[in-house]
Image: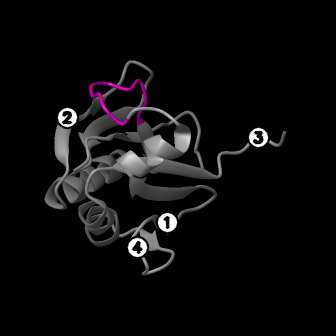
């Protein structure tokens, strides 16, 4: 197996709202305007897909019921501390909820967390030890 993550799919309750948040609020590039059943956003290396949560659960063969911390966060690394603050502000102005304001971390970086309108946790981080491109 070649090591890669091709697509991260988020199960969403409100597809139009989620598309608006990622496209209009965060400025991600939508692959195709036909977003009636699924939406794909092109990124460097990995794509982000939004798919109705019930349909995603049905595809997997599990129940869509349940909530709480899933044990998963998504991360976006930036080049500077200032970019962390800037991107958190952009996300909040687009409808995200700030969960943890940016601060210096125990591992020597700087990061903060928000949840998108569907409740998915995103970390915005600056890591002085290595750059993820």
Report helix, strand or loop for mark 3.
Answer: loop
Residue ID for mark 2: 99
Decide which of 128, 35 is in the foreground and name it.
35
Q: CA distance from mark 2 to mark 1?
A: 26 Å
Looking at the image, which residue sits at the far right? Answer: 1
Q: Nearer the viewer, mark 3 or mark 4?
A: 4
Whole-percent x, y for residue 92 in the image:
17, 53
Q: CA distance from mark 3 to mark 4?
A: 29 Å
Whole-percent x, y for residue 3 in the image:
76, 40
Quarter occupied by residue 98: top left
Tag 4 or tag 3, which sits nearer the N-term? 3
Question: Quarter holding the N terminus?
Answer: top right
Q: CA distance from mark 1 to mark 3?
A: 21 Å
Q: CA distance from mark 1 to mark 4?
A: 8 Å
Q: Residue at x 64, y 57 (%)?
A: 45
Asked if the residue at tag 4 contacts the one at tag 3, i.e. Cβ–Cβ closer than 8 Å, the answer is no
Tag 4 or tag 1, which sits nearer the N-term? 4
Q: Nearer the viewer, mark 2 or mark 1?
A: 1
Quarter occupied by residue 17: bottom left
Residue 40's disc number: 1
Tag 3 or tag 1, which sits nearer the N-term? 3
Tag 3 or tag 2, which sits nearer the N-term? 3
Residue 35's disc number: 4
Q: Residue at x 59, y 46 (%)?
A: 132
Name above or below for residue 107 compared with residue 78.
above
Q: Which residues are magenta?
A: 64-73
Q: Residue at x 19, y 61 (%)?
A: 94
Q: Position of 100 compared to 33: left or right? A: left
Residue ID for mark 3: 3
Quarter occupied by residue 51: bottom left
């Amino acid at each position: 197996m070649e090591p890669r993550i091709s697509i991260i799919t988020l199960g969403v309750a409100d597809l139009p709202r989620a598309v608006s948040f990622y496209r209009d609020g965060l400025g991600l590039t939508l692959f195709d305007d036909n977003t009636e059943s699924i939406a794909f956003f092109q990124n460097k290396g990995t794509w982000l897909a939004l798919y109705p949560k019930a349909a995603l659960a049905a595809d997997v063969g599990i129940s869509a019921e349940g909530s709480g911390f899933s044990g998963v966060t998504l991360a976006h690394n930036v080049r500077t501390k200032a970019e962390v603050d800037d991107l958190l502000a952009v996300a909040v102005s687009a409808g995200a909820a700030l969960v943890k304001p940016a601060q210096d971390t125990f591992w020597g970086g700087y990061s903060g967390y928000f949840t998108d309108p569907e409740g998915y946790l995103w970390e915005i981080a600056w890591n002085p030890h290595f750059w993820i491109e």
